[in-house]
Image (cartoon, rainbow, N blue to C red):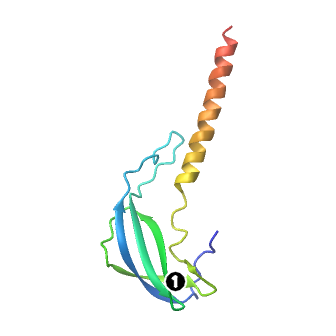
Amino acid sequence: MPEPANPQWPEAMATVTACKYDAGAGRAMAFGLPTTRHFQITYNYWANGELHTGEFSSAKAVPQNTLFPIRYNPEAPHENSHSASSPITRSSVLAVGIIGSIILTLAWFLIMRSCY
């Protein structure tokens, strides 16, 4: 897991390379995990002489070629101030949904079994 951005990390300018609307499949689960972030923003930046790419979610569209400042870890330049900006990932939402389904199924079987 990336470290939180340190204000002493070097700063670079990132460029938005793509902004895609995410229809939100699986965003509103029965267990209260909805999110309003609907745009996947892809960006790149130069750090230590290498081009790095990242992605984050945003509630608003960010036009392609928009520049914004970013801080990166000089010891691991792929880690940056935007790399941990999406705390709820699809895999975590999917895992909660599967576990919830199993629990509800077991509860249903227990209720049905007690009827006989």
Viewer-nearest residue: 36 or 79: 79
Q: Quadrant of the C terminus?
A: top right
Tell how many labels. 1
Question: Which image quadrant: the N terminus?
Answer: bottom right
Could you tell me which secondary element the residue under label 1 belongs to? strand
Give the image location of residue 8, x and y in percent.
58, 88
Q: Is residue 3 left or right of residue 17?
A: right
Q: Is residue 78 left or right of residue 68?
A: right
- The quarter of the displayed image where residue 106 is located: top right
Relative placement, left or right, of 74 versus 50 is: right
Q: Position of residue 109 (x, y in %)?
A: 65, 21
Q: Quadrant of residue 63?
A: bottom left
- Image: 100 above or below 53: above
Q: Answer with the quarter of the image where residue 96 lies.
A: top right
Q: Can you give x and y, in whole percent of width and height, for residue 59 in the image?
A: 38, 61
* Residue positioned most to the front: 50
Which residue is drawn at the image coordinates 41% and 58% (left, top)?
37
Which residue: 60% across, 75% down? Answer: 4
Residue density around tag 1, few if under 14, some if 14–19, many if 20 or more, within 10 Å: many
Q: Is residue 53 above or below residue 99?
A: below
Task: Identify the residue at horizontal 49%, vertical 42% (top origin).
Answer: 29
**Residue sitting at 59 percent across and 40 percent down?**
98
Give the camera-side residue of 91 and 110.
91
Q: Is residue 96 above or below residue 62?
A: above
Three-letter code, disc 1:
Arg
- Is residue 22 found left or right of 83 in the rendered image? left
Seen from this angle, which residue lies furthest bottom?
49
Residue projecting furthest to the left: 63
Image height of 42 relative to 8, above or below: above
Write down the residue under mark 1.
71
Q: Which residue occupies the extreme top position in the image?
A: 116
